[in-house]
Amino acid sequence: MSMLISYDPIDQQAIGEVPITTNAQMPTLVAAAKKAQHAWAKVSLLDRQQIVVKAYEKLAKVQESLTLLISKEMGKDYRRASYEVAGTAQNAGYFCQEIAAALKPESMGHGAELQYRPLGVVAVIAPWNYPLAMANNLLLPALMAGNSVILKPSELTPLVADLFVSTLNEVLPEGVLQIAHGDSATGKALVEADINMVAFTGSLAAGKHIMASAASSLKRLVMELGGNDPMIVMATADIDKAVQFAVASSFENAGQMCTSTERVYVDARVAEEFEQKVVALASRYQVGQWDQTNVNIGPIVSHKQHQRVLSQLKDAEQKGAKFLLGNADYEVPYIQPTVVTDIRPEMQLEHDETFGPVVAISRFTHISEAIERANASPFGLGAAVFGGAGAADVAEQIEAGMVGVNQGAGGPGPWVGAKQSGFGFHGTAAGHRQFAQVRVISK
């Protein structure tokens, strides 16, 4: 039996291992999911809700273990990892209630009823940067809708997912929730299998492959495909507030977040003040291991990702960017807090997703220039506009699924991307319903 080994990103020491799901095993996994789904679909929505809530209550006994695994597998500091676990466990009851309300049949009048029925077997392919929360955001509505789920976690964080699934399965009916471990080959086999839907969070390139594979059988898709989030700082902005957001958003989770601020466009009239304050704040961030006190930035998850960030920094340096803090050469596994200015459109830092703790700044003289550059990307996940009068008008012109005015993107609405950052969405009633088949019964 081939094993998938999980490594600590700090020292590359093995943490644990799980068996790899082979391509030959995939039909058996899917057959078990189909069998379980038929029975699960017959359970009433209210009873499903009660079962799922009870399953999530079991997470309380492994909360500490999940927190430590997130820290050890991807390097996230203990405090942030604990928030991820607590949020997943403690909010499950509320979200199950919200999902159940969204999936209730609706009277259409004249004897017609709108129903939300299960789709069948749903593949959930989850990323490594929020290995519990991101998987849960897709897994929970899929289960509540009466589907069975096969979770394929990132090969970088298999132990988190394995403990998560095994704990829930202490309550869930057999076969309703299964796990498939492995690299992209395992994901490819799962997508090509006889399933009904793929819910995916990951790279644009992987999303395109999934979409092409799903086309032959018209599998349903919900995909979040990353971002290259812009931030516009107008001359009328509260500079201190804008600085705090720019640094916090760029450095959160060592910059390994899909809605990290990747590009900051600052009005030239306030740029010098903004840059000075960004450097002052960024200099206070501490880099280190997850178990060290006062650490704000942990390691980059892998050597491959570390090299990707360095490649972008070196490209910027070669093309004339100015480093206000840090440089273009850091030893594995850390990227120190970095602030770069004079970013231009031809640089990788502008047009590629970085996924590292870098504040990349450009100046503009007219707001139309900032809007044009903000929109000059195939991505359109999140964005932020900081300013006084007129900031909301600028936000209206940004091509993104989520735009914050004097705050970050997201909020109480669905998690949705525009352009090539998303296909479908999740969260809120409309998002929950994407995991169900709409049916109209007329009597």
Image (cartoon, rainbow, N blue to C red):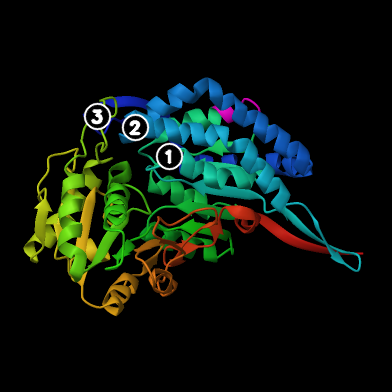
x 33%, y 53%: residue: 260
Q: Dot 3 lies on which element? A: loop
x 41%, y 75%: residue: 397
Name the residue beneath numbered marker 3: 289
Name the residue beneath numbered marker 2: 73
Q: Quadrant of the C terminus?
A: bottom right
At which x and y percent is residue 398? 40, 71
Front label number (3 vs 2): 3
Determine crowd level at label 1: few under 14, some 14-19, many 20+ residues with C-alpha closer than 10 A. many
Front label number (3 vs 1): 3
Tell me which label, 3 or 2, sits earlier in the chain: 2
Determine crowd level at label 2: few under 14, some 14-19, many 20+ residues with C-alpha closer than 10 A. many
Task: Identify residue type, mark 3.
Answer: Gln
Q: Quadrant of the N terminus?
A: top left
Q: How many marks?
A: 3
Q: Which residues are magenta?
A: 167-171
Left or right: residue 315 versus residue 428 is left
Determine crowd level at label 3: few under 14, some 14-19, many 20+ residues with C-alpha closer than 10 A. many
Name the residue beneath numbered marker 1: 131
Task: Identify residue type, mark 2.
Answer: Glu
Q: Dot 2 lies on which element? A: helix
Q: Tell me if residue 119 is in the magenta stretch.
A: no
Please say whether residue 75 is visible from this viewpoint.
yes
